[in-house]
Image (spheres, grey):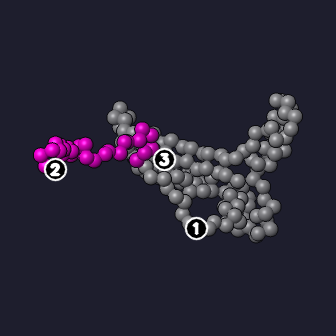
Amino acid sequence: WSSATPARPSPTRAASRKRKPRSTSRTWRWPIRKPANRPVSASRCLMTAARSVSPKLPARLSMSEVDTYTPRLRAKYRDQIKAHMKEKYGYANDLQIPRLDKIVINMGVGEASQDSKKIKGALEDLEAISGQRPVKTVAKKSIAGFKLREEQVIGAKVTLRQ
């Protein structure tokens, strides 16, 4: 065997291990966040929404009041805007009219890179407007011209759903 078979060259270090190709996706480094496993009651969410939309409402609502409460924007959309859109665009069926699935309130704070107090004020303002705690938005890239660093807080947003 030893004289008849030519010696196989030993594989080089680079050839012996295969590299996993990098993803070209923008978000390849950020892991997907899973929602917390805590139950949220619909009545609690509706009570918070009801309290934040109208300052005239009491701080606590009974369960019967929560079930009958309709936000003003939803009522106006249902009663006035849908009828106007059906007439204006000539929709034959009510299901052709666009629906409101969610409303996103976004606030960019340009001065937040220099002063962290401004972002706190913006968060408090958004919380007062929407009745929900806002999510801080961060910079995806560093931009030297704007004195902006990656993952620096630059704004806030709130998503209102049904």
Q: Residue at x 28, y 47 (%)?
A: 17
Q: Which of the two discs, 2 and 3, sits closer to the camera?
A: 2
Residue farthest to the top, as pictured: 89
Q: Which of the two discs, 2 and 1, sits closer to the camera?
A: 2
Could you tell me which secondary element the residue under label 3 belongs to?
Answer: strand
Query: What distance separates the C-alpha of mark 2 from that of mark 1?
Result: 68 Å
Return the x and y of residue 144 as percentages of the image width and height. Answer: 34, 35
Location of residue 28 (image quadrant): top left
Q: Residue at x 43, y 49 (%)?
A: 30
Return the x and y of residue 57 as percentages of the image width and height. Answer: 74, 61
In the rendered structure, the answer to whether residue 90 lies left or right of residue 41 reads right
In the picture of the structure, the residue carrying the numbered disc 3 is 137
Q: Mark 1, residues whose alpha carbon is within 10 Å: few (<14), some, or many (≥20)?
A: few
Residue 80 in view here: no
In the picture of the structure, the residue carrying the numbered disc 1 is 38
Query: What distance separates the C-alpha of mark 1 from that of mark 3?
Result: 24 Å
Location of residue 69 (image quadrant): bottom right
Q: Nearer the viewer, residue 140 or 33?
A: 33
In the rendered structure, the answer to whether residue 87 lies left or right of residue 39 reads right
Q: Residue at x 54, y 43 (%)?
A: 107
Q: Earlier in the sequence, mark 2 or mark 1?
A: 2
In the picture of the structure, the residue carrying the numbered disc 2 is 1
